[in-house]
Image: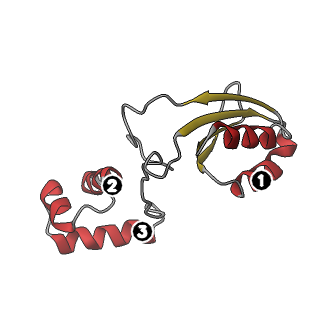
Amino acid sequence: MDEVDHGILQCLQKDGRMSLKKIAEKVALTPPAVAERIRKLERGGVITGYTAVVNTRKMEENVRAIINVTLPPERQDAFVACVRELEGVQWMHHVTGAFSMSIFASFRNTDELEQMVKTLQRFGRTQTLIVMSTPIPNALGAM
């Protein structure tokens, strides 16, 4: 990967629907050259997919939370399988520090949040943070 590839990736992380023409202008290539580089990045596994960033408030999911969970390593596989089935989960990261996993999810109301927390507490200790606002949305891109 070179600086041009990094530039293409930055464009796509900022706006996954950015036109080839606009990306080409930003990285000083032709649109066909950009398209070929994107195909190579996809085939090489650097780009693993595309996703839509959804404004959950427009979907009447007005409660957003980060739920940190501490669980023993032997429960991790069962925990991941359980979380994959839960509605509202936007992402989950395996993290270092005081917690094992960090989950971001959205809910229509606090009753839904409480139900999810109860489900997660079967696996370990939780800490729930209610999101008040998002001053920098989707700045880093999910991995």
Where is residue 36? Give x, y as percent. Answer: 28, 73
| Residue at position x 48%, y 28% in the image | 132
| Residue at position x 61%, y 51% in the image | 88
Amino acid tagged 3:
Glu
Compared across the picture, whether 126 is left or right of 39 comes to: right
**Residue annotated with mark 3:** 42
Q: Dot 3, crowdedness within 10 Å: few (<14), some or many (≥20)?
A: few
**Secondary structure type for disc 3:** helix
Q: Earlier in the sequence, mark 3 or mark 2?
A: 2
Amino acid tagged 1:
Cys
**Secondary structure type for disc 2:** helix
**Residue annotated with mark 2:** 9
Where is residue 16? Give x, y as percent. Answer: 33, 59
Q: Dot 1, crowdedness within 10 Å: few (<14), some or many (≥20)?
A: few
Closer to the observer: label 1 or label 3?
1
Q: Distance between the residues labelled 1 and 3?
A: 29 Å
| Residue at position x 35%, y 72% in the image | 39
Amino acid tagged 2:
Leu
| Image quadrant assignment for residue 84 | bottom right
Q: How far apart are marks 2 and 1 (CA)?
A: 32 Å
**Residue annotated with mark 1:** 82
Numbered-mark total: 3
| Image quadrant assignment for residue 4 | bottom left
Q: How far apart are marks 3 and 2 (CA)?
A: 11 Å
Q: Which of marks 1 and 3 is nearer the N terminus?
A: 3
